[in-house]
Image (cartoon, rainbow, N blue to C red):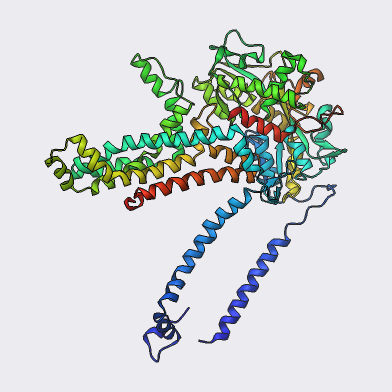
Amino acid sequence: MPEGRWKWATAAVAVVVMAVAAGCGSSSSSSSSKPPTKIGKGEGKLNLVAWEGYTQPEWVKPFETQTGCKVSSKFAGSSDEMVTLMRQGGGSQYDMVSASGDASLRLIRGGDVKPVNVNLVPSWKDFIPQLKSPSHNTVDGKHYGVSVQWGPNVLLYNTQAVTPGPTSWSVIYGPTYKGKVSVPDNPIQIADAALYLSKTNPSLGITDPYELNQKQLNAATDLLKKQKPLIKKYWALSSDESDLFKNGDVVVGAAWPIAVKTLEADKQPVKDTIPKEGATGWADTWMLSAKAKHPNCAYEWMKYISTPKVQAQQAVSYGETPVNQKACPLMDQIEKGSCARLHANAPASYFNSIKFWKTPIADCGNGKTDCQDYTVWQKKWQEVKG
Amino acid sequence: MAPVGALAGRPPGAARRASAWLFRRPGLRAALTLTPPLGWFVLLYLAALVALLVSAFWSVDPFTSEVVHKWTTANFKSLIEDPTYRRIAFRTIGIAAAVTITDGILAFPFAYFAARVAPRRLQTVLFVLVLLPLWSSYLVRVYAWRLILAHDGALNWTLDKLHFGSLNVGYSNWAMWIVFSYIWLPFMIVPVWTAIERVPDSLLEASMDLGGSVWRTFRSVLLPLALPGLIAGSIFTFSLTLGDYITPTLVGGASSDFIGNVVYRNVGVANNVPFAAAFATLPMIVMGIYLTVARRLGAFEAL
């Protein structure tokens, strides 16, 4: 056997392996720090992390034909999951995320998303003033994405089982509907309890349900622990909650508007309301990954999703409020009265009555730094559920 | 690689010489045969376990979610000191034990009938029936149970028609116990069936001939001889329940977190892999103890 040939073959294989390894290593460092000033040619693909219902074919299909960017979306069930997905695999797996206010700041501080040039999104100037540069997606004057939609977390109830219709969150903290209550399986649910306590127990001095010191956080956790025997199930997916209502396991609970829409479409006897204590809510932002592989398609998406027509489509489909003020008449075209029903033309006082999700951090914002950060919230939530 | 012709042709080629050389060295031959599979095993299986154990001693930076590669026992400390995790661990082990006992009690009479009473044709039918549920997806079966046990589900509908009122078992630990017992039952029946089949008729007859009652024969002859099968089955039912997190998510109630749910949430949602790794060592320890006891009782001879 000619030994020399084997040696050469082995050497050749080794060279190829090294070349491949080197090639893989060098192709992942192309993130520029300055946002672009114009949108280049689309890359043909766009990978999104989104809330379920945010990438319906109704508006994704036309986008794909218009821009040639093929959209694939991964649905996340919670803000925590979104943050994790954006960080997995070095952070280059997904181009964009529809992050809520409790995730966006974590992504910005963690360096997972990068600033965008809002001048490339023509509809941005039509946004309601509060959501052009909100503190949850704009830091030091830099925009880390464009706002998309917002809305409140509502109180959902079965109109046959729960009479008269509740006007206070006390209905999910009191024993009347024991074993027939459902709330989201999400640490941010602590804020709902804190909001309720801020009205019912003023001596605690809660002013912002996301800025809680140890005593206030413990009070909220205690309330949730007392609530636990009343809970049938903590829901992880909005569709789970719809099932619980449909099968009669649950008659009252905290919900997202999409669950209400699903149940109403199914002719179930349900109604939603914002109780007198007010409500927590969300304001979502399409954010651009710091290592996005398809940035041009991402800009095309931001441009497209902000236009009045798409804003109206998504608002009516999901049951939330668009950030683009010009969407209102188009919403009424899709479904009569939907603009008023979804508060797209409501005065600023309505916006201000909602306590929007944000990431709890140690800095209370009033000069004190004894607030509990999100890791403590997560532990407390596990304690409540354990 | 080596040309085949070398083996048949002469003069003897390199392959022939190598084979003759190896023939004289049995130790080396065994080593060469075992190295590839063993290497694979060590690399894929043991290395993964070691990585798990090591990362359990790391921590996560709370703001950036980056893993900090610094040795700390904080994860284990919070596992031991926090009553929440103790409750979750006891719940997991408790339900796994309850499911195992339930499946043992359900499987034994069935396996006895199938192995010793049923005629040959019926045996085949029974065997297919036992394995039939495994043909459909695990998820489909769990979702089916969710519909059965729901408040307005099939179970309560039936009870209502029979004027028995209604049961409130949907989304509770009872529901988990029922669903787990159903899902893992085939894994108990098959080894018990094999074990009972292996017991010679003569032993049972001898016991009866010597005046042993049916109960006495069962207790002193059949049960001890079938015990390895029961234990082999229990390894499946116990370990499968211990590691599950889907059934608790789907049919569990307000307080139904398993160890697996906490692990899942720490990996997929909170991004705290070290803590998940620390909690995941607990089922490993429990299963280690369980398998040691099972080996003592001779369970592996019945597999």
Residue B98 percent location from the top left of the image: 41, 33
- Tell me where residue A202 sits by quadrant: top right
Q: State whether residue B268 is above or below residue B2.
A: above
Total number of numbered discs in the rendering: 0
Q: State whether residue A373 is above or below residue A271.
A: below
Q: Residue furthest left?
A: B209
Residue B55 percent location from the top left of the image: 63, 50
Which residue is nearer to you in this view: B107 or B209? B209
Residue B270 percent location from the top left of the image: 65, 39
The C terminus of chain A - image quarter:
top right
Q: Is residue A298 visible?
A: yes
Residue at x-position 35% and y-position 42%: B188
Looking at the image, residue B113 sits to the left or right of residue B269; the answer is left
Residue at x-position 41% and y-position 35%: B99
Residue at x-position 66% and y-position 41%: A49
Q: Residue furthest bottom?
A: B11
Q: State whether residue B232 is above or below residue A208.
A: below
- Tell me where residue A354 sits by quadrant: top right
Residue A323 percent location from the top left of the image: 77, 29
Looking at the image, residue B88 sits to the left or right of residue B69; the answer is left
Q: Is residue B146 visible?
A: no
Which residue is nearer to you in this view: B201 or A342? B201
Which residue is nearer to you in this view: B105 or A300? B105
Which residue is nearer to you in this view: A51 or A102? A102
Residue at x-position 63% and y-position 40%: B77
